[in-house]
Every structure is written in structure tokens, then in C-alpha cells.
């Protein structure tokens, strides 16, 4: 009996780790055993007309029964979520108010399945801002970015170039964990982007490190994968910034843990980042082309 209980607890823990956040029934249900739904009765075709029907005017179309046409009104769905996010983010005067706005924001469906808001970690007064992709399971539990195995690996990489969490500020493109660590949808990213942009405005860093393909593609607006983007300085800019910010894409620590052979590439990126930070200058003003 004890063995069965332990196996059940282990199976439940595995499901939670895989992203199963809630039960939808008290008893298991085999939906594959259900009979297929009955096909609807075919609608008999209308008899062919001998003479062509008169051309319908706009008035006829609008009056045709069963033809739905949208009426002017407030935005709905994804558009409304983005509009709400922009309004709430713009109203935040500091990082604390931005976090409070995110806690009140209901426009991202990931909030309903996540355990915690994963906002930021580190020093908001730092000159360096690191932006990753999305929280994982450990980050979701603790409500901080980069606190799992990938976060510990990133901490070691930062220590090799003389940095730690007191000298950098860390956040993500997504503030809630996608179930099962799946790739976020464009709508989910769009709902979070006004907060990300305002976050960068409020912190006003001198340098950005973009960890992972989603972060690099979203903020730099480039289609290339992270293996092509990494190691090349770009300028991140939008209308709310007083100046472009040098940004260096690099490989995400979680990817490096799965692909250890690529650590040498990340090490090259970190050394390049250290060189720029120590110089205190914009590396793109020193002759490195932005397209690479």
C-alpha cells in the first residue's frame, strides 16, 4: 500500500513538473472510447435558377437574414490586451509601480496557469540589464528569473567576467511561465511587450544582454536564429528611449546546459561584453558593424 502511494505521489510530481497545473475532472475519462459525433443531415441544395438573380446592393446585403456584420465598438481579444498593457505600463512611474501594474494586468492568459509573477531580480540601478525568454518551473515557484539550474550556470558565467546579481538587473520577455515550458505564442509576447519596453525605459541601462532567441528576435526585430545573431552588437531602440542602447545577443543558459559544446561560443560573447562594459563606450561607435 505504501509503495502504491509513493508511486502515485511521484507520478503527480512528474505531471506538475511537465506543466499540468490543474485537474479537469474527479475521475479519468477515456475520450477515445466515445462514439464519433453523428454527421449533420445534409442540407438539400436549392434548385437552379433559370434566370440570373438581380445584383444585390449594399442595402440588400445588410438586410439579408443570417448575415452577421461587426458593429463599431471597443477592441476585443488580443488587441484589447495590448491596448490595456500599453496604458497600464505607460502610467508606471518607477519599477515598483510597473510590477504592481503587472500584478493587476489580466490580458495575458499565462497568468491563469502560472503560480507566480516572475518580474525581476538583481539591482535596478545597475548599468547592465539581462533579458531572457520566459520563466521555467523553478522560476515560477520562486517568482524570480534565472534561479534554477540555468540561473546558477549564468551566475558562474557572470562571475568569470567580474559581475554578479548586485551589478546586473535581470528580467524576461514573458513574466509568467508557459505551461510545460512550451514556446510562447505571438499573442502572449505582444501582451507583455509594452511592460518590457517600459521596464527598459525605467531602468535605463547602458548595456543590454539578450539571452536566447526569443529575446533577441523580439527586441531587435530580426528574423535570424540566435546562433547567427549571437556575438554581434546591435542597437536596441524605440520611441520612449532617449538614445539607442547597445545590445549583445547570446545563447540562453538552458540551451548551453543541453548543448555543452556551445559553451565556448557563449564564453566568447561574455568576454566581448566585458570588454565593452569596461571601456564604458558604445561598441558600435568603435567600428563594429551592426549587421553581421
Image (cartoon, helix red, strand yellow):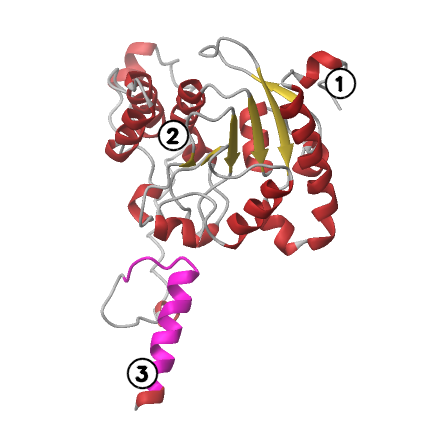
> Mark 3 = which residue?
5
> Dot 2: few (<14), some (14–19), or many (≥20) neighbours within 10 Å?
many
Above or below, comparing residue 86 to residue 109 in the picture = above
Span shown in magenta: 4-23
In-image side of 29 versus 216 (left or right): left
Residue 100 in picture, x, y percent from top left = 26, 30
In-image side of 122 versus 80 (left or right): right
- Element type at marker 1? loop
Q: Quadrant of the N terminus?
A: bottom left
Q: Quadrant of the C terminus?
A: top right
Among the two numbered marks 1 and 3 on one chain, the one whose residue lies closer to the N terminus: 3
Residue drawn at x 38%, y 81% as measured from the top left: 7
Residue 149 in picture, x, y percent from top left = 52, 55
| Count of numbered circles on the image | 3
Nearer mark to the viewer, of 1 and 3:
1
- As drawn, the label of residue 288 is 1
Residue 111 placement: quadrant: top left
- Element type at marker 3? helix
Residue 49 placement: quadrant: top left
> Mark 2 = which residue?
191
Please name whichever residue, 265 or 19, is drawn nearer the observer in this view of the structure. Answer: 265
Above or below, comparing residue 189 to residue 55 in the picture = below
Residue 196 in picture, x, y percent from top left = 43, 27
Please name whichever residue, 289 or 154, is drawn nearer the observer in this view of the structure. Answer: 154
Residue 194 in picture, x, y percent from top left = 39, 23
Above or below, comparing residue 33 to residue 221 in the picture = below
Q: Is residue 9 magenta?
A: yes
Q: Is residue 241 magenta?
A: no
> How many angstroms separate mark 2 from mark 1 (CA)?
34 Å
Residue drawn at x 59%, y 47% as measured from the top left: 156
Residue drawn at x 22%, y 69% as measured from the top left: 26
Amino acid at each position: 500500500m505504501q509503495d502504491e502511494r509513493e508511486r502515485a505521489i511521484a507520478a503527480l510530481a512528474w505531471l506538475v513538473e511537465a506543466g499540468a497545473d490543474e485537474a479537469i475532472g474527479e475521475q479519468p475519462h477515456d475520450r477515445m472510447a466515445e462514439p464519433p459525433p453523428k454527421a449533420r443531415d445534409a442540407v438539400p441544395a436549392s434548385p437552379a435558377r433559370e434566370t440570373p438573380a438581380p445584383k444585390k446592393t449594399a442595402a440588400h446585403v445588410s438586410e439579408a437574414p443570417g448575415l452577421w456584420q461587426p458593429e463599431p465598438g471597443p477592441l476585443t481579444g488580443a488587441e484589447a490586451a495590448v491596448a490595456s498593457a500599453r496604458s497600464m505600463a505607460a502610467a508606471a512611474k518607477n519599477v515598483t509601480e510597473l510590477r504592481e501594474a503587472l500584478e493587476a494586468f489580466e490580458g495575458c492568459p499565462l497568468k491563469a496557469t502560472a503560480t507566480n509573477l516572475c518580474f525581476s531580480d538583481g539591482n535596478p540601478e545597475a548599468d547592465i540589464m539581462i533579458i531572457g525568454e520566459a520563466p521555467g518551473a523553478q522560476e515560477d515557484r520562486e517568482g524570480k528569473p534565472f534561479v534554477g539550474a540555468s540561473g546558477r550556470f549564468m551566475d558562474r558565467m557572470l562571475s568569470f567576467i567580474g559581475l554578479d546579481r548586485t551589478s546586473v538587473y535581470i528580467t524576461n520577455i514573458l513574466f509568467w511561465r508557459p505551461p510545460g515550458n512550451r514556446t510562447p505564442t505571438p499573442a502572449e509576447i505582444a501582451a507583455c511587450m509594452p511592460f518590457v519596453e517600459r521596464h527598459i525605459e525605467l531602468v535605463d541601462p547602458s548595456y543590454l544582454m539578450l539571452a536566447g532567441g526569443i529575446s533577441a528576435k523580439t527586441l531587435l526585430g530580426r528574423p535570424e536564429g540566435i546562433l547567427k545573431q549571437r556575438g554581434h552588437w546591435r542597437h536596441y531602440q524605440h520611441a520612449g528611449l532617449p538614445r539607442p542602447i547597445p545590445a549583445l545577443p547570446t545563447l540562453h543558459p538552458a540551451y548551453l546546459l543541453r548543448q555543452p559544446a556551445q559553451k565556448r561560443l557563449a564564453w566568447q560573447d561574455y568576454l566581448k561584453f566585458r570588454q565593452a562594459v569596461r571601456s564604458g563606450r558604445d561598441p558600435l561607435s568603435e567600428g563594429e558593424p551592426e549587421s553581421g
